[in-house]
Image (cartoon, helix red, strand yellow):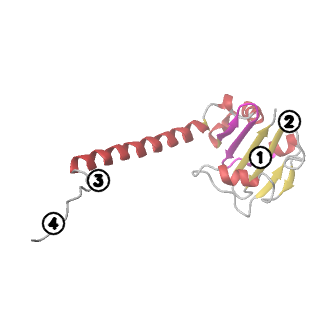
Amino acid sequence: MQETKPIRPNPFRFSLRALLVLTFVFAFCIASCVRIAIERERSRHLADPQRWPRPIQEILKRSPTIAGSIKVYDLQGFLDETKLVSVTGRQDVVDQLISSFGLVPTNNKHPYATQIFDALPSTWKTPQPSYIWYASQGFGSVHQEGVDLFLIATDPATGDAVILYNWIF
């Protein structure tokens, strides 16, 4: 007489219907996460000039035509305010900030330069080695409160610039 082995049920056996339902639920969860990430990214782009940094608003009041050349991205905005500003083809805006706030030349090794590179939206131009850098005096080395602080990377050939704006309460 031949011995028969007992049949053990396979605990991981799914029906086709169960697999389709699990696949649908998983795809729905992934799509929801992607949508939330996209909405969060969009909400950080500030289209309303009233939410832009005060110095940019003041330049905008004097030259309303520059609004189309500026994009603002909110990094932090509770008590302290940190924003990235993209200026396309308007070296005059950068020159006004440099002269108005006494910015000094620096380089891409500035302590806050990594914040620009890390937070830069993917659709914006990345500062290149040929860019000229300016910063507020003491920004990144001396604690300063209640003042407008800037780190600017500008392309002298095109007038494009990326600006890190920081205001500490």
Rendered location of residue 66, percent (x, y): 68, 39
Query: Considering only order in the chain, which callout, 1 or 4, is on the residue closer to the N terminus?
Result: 4
Q: Which of 6 and 105 is in front in this view?
A: 6
Query: Considering only order in the chain, which callout, 4 or 2, is on the residue closer to the N terminus?
Result: 4
Camera-nearest label, 2 or 4: 4
Crowdedness near tag 3: few (<14), some (14–19) or many (≥20) residues, C-alpha within 10 Å: few
Whether residue 86 appears in magenta in the rendering, the answer is: yes
Camera-nearest label, 1 or 2: 2
Q: Which amino acid does label 4 sit on?
A: Thr
Q: What element carries label 4?
A: loop
Give the residue displayed 86% in from the left and 55% down from the top: 105
Please tell me the numbered disc located at residue 11.
3
Res. 167 image quadrant:
top right
Rendered location of residue 118, percent (x, y): 67, 53
Camera-nearest label, 4 or 1: 4
Q: Give the range drawn in magenta.
A: 72-95
Camera-nearest label, 3 or 1: 3
Query: Considering only order in the chain, which callout, 2 or 1, is on the residue closer to the N terminus?
Result: 1
Residue positioned most to the bottom: 1
Q: Mark 1 points at which residue?
A: 94
How far is the residue under mark 4 from the one under mark 3?
21 Å
Horizontal side of 85 relative to 98 (left or right) equals left
Q: Mark 4 points at which residue?
A: 4
Camera-nearest label, 4 or 3: 4
Give the residue displayed 76% in from the left and 34% down from the top: 80
Res. 25 image quadrant:
top left
Q: Mark 2 points at which residue?
A: 147
Residue positioned most to the left: 1
How far is the residue under mark 2 from the one under mark 4?
85 Å
Q: Which amino acid does label 2 sit on?
A: Val
Q: Are the residues flagged by discs 3 and 2 in contact, CB closer than 8 Å? A: no
Horizontal side of 151 relative to 84 (left or right) equals right
